Amino acid sequence: MEALRLIKTARHALAEARHVPDVLAEARQAALLTEAVGALLTESEEDDDLPGLGQQLSEAGAHAAICLGRSVATNALVHGGRVGRITELGEPAVALEALDDLLREVGETLVVLACGADSESLYWACIDGVDAVSECKDVTARLIEAADRGGGAERTVLGGAEPEPDGRSAPLLVVRLGPPGEDGPSDYRVTGAAEAPAVSEVSVSAG
């Protein structure tokens, strides 16, 4: 299955998740998908920069999956995982832009969980996840730049969107204000990320 289709499936599944274990499981699935996309890019012959950056993305995705694997996500992993169905990358620029959107949504969703965390273990699981996903997003932004070189017109013909000057590929920056304590859950300020109504509307519960 083409990477773009799986990324779209992952975004939908993340938006539909309503309970903390399910949200964390979907976040880990996104990290595994990132690792797989990076691995496919290492085989690319379209640009000299793509294989090296693809290796970095694969390693960053694997690290994010490990970080999220330490959380309660291990109790609610998607059956078998969808990442095993990926067989081809498709158009690199289009897939990478979709992956960038997925990673942004994962980061913002983890911030939402951290804001309402009722335990330090959940709080730190979310923090570790945000940091790891931000690293993936940084590498993805560099890959988009590499894939975009001289490929804008071709991508438009193939149905992809031109880059938007809205900071969508900017790193997710989170101001850390501390874990939950006697005064209740901590708060976050998120900058450098586009608005994501689907994430802000999600209501998650620990049940």
Image (tube, rainbow, N blue to C red):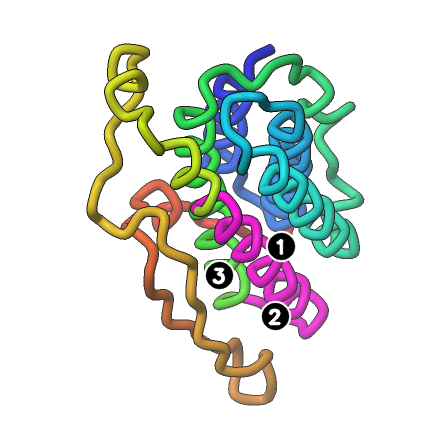
Classify residue 83 as left or right of residue 45. right
Q: Which residues are magenta?
A: 117-141
Mainly helix, strand or loop, the magenta region? helix
- The kind of secondary structure element at disc 3 is helix
C-alpha distance separating marks 3 and 1: 15 Å
Question: Label 2: which residue?
Answer: 118
User: Looking at the image, is mark 3 or mark 2 earlier in the sequence?
Assistant: 3
Q: Nearer the viewer, residue 94 or 115?
A: 94
Q: Nearer the viewer, residue 100 or 68?
A: 100
Q: Is residue 11 above or below residue 70?
A: above
Q: Nearer the viewer, residue 56 or 115?
A: 56
- The kind of secondary structure element at disc 1 is loop
Question: Label 1: which residue?
Answer: 206
User: Which residue corresponds to the image point at 72% horizontal and 69% vertical from the top-left?
Assistant: 121
Q: Is residue 51 visible?
A: yes
Tell me which amino acid carries mark 1: Ala
Q: Is residue 101 visible?
A: no
Say whether marks 2 and 1 touch (CB < 8 Å): yes
Q: Which mark is residue 111?
A: 3
Local crowd at mark 2 within 10 Å, few (<14), some, or many (≥20)? some
Say whether marks 3 and 1 touch (CB < 8 Å): no
Local crowd at mark 1 within 10 Å, few (<14), some, or many (≥20)? few
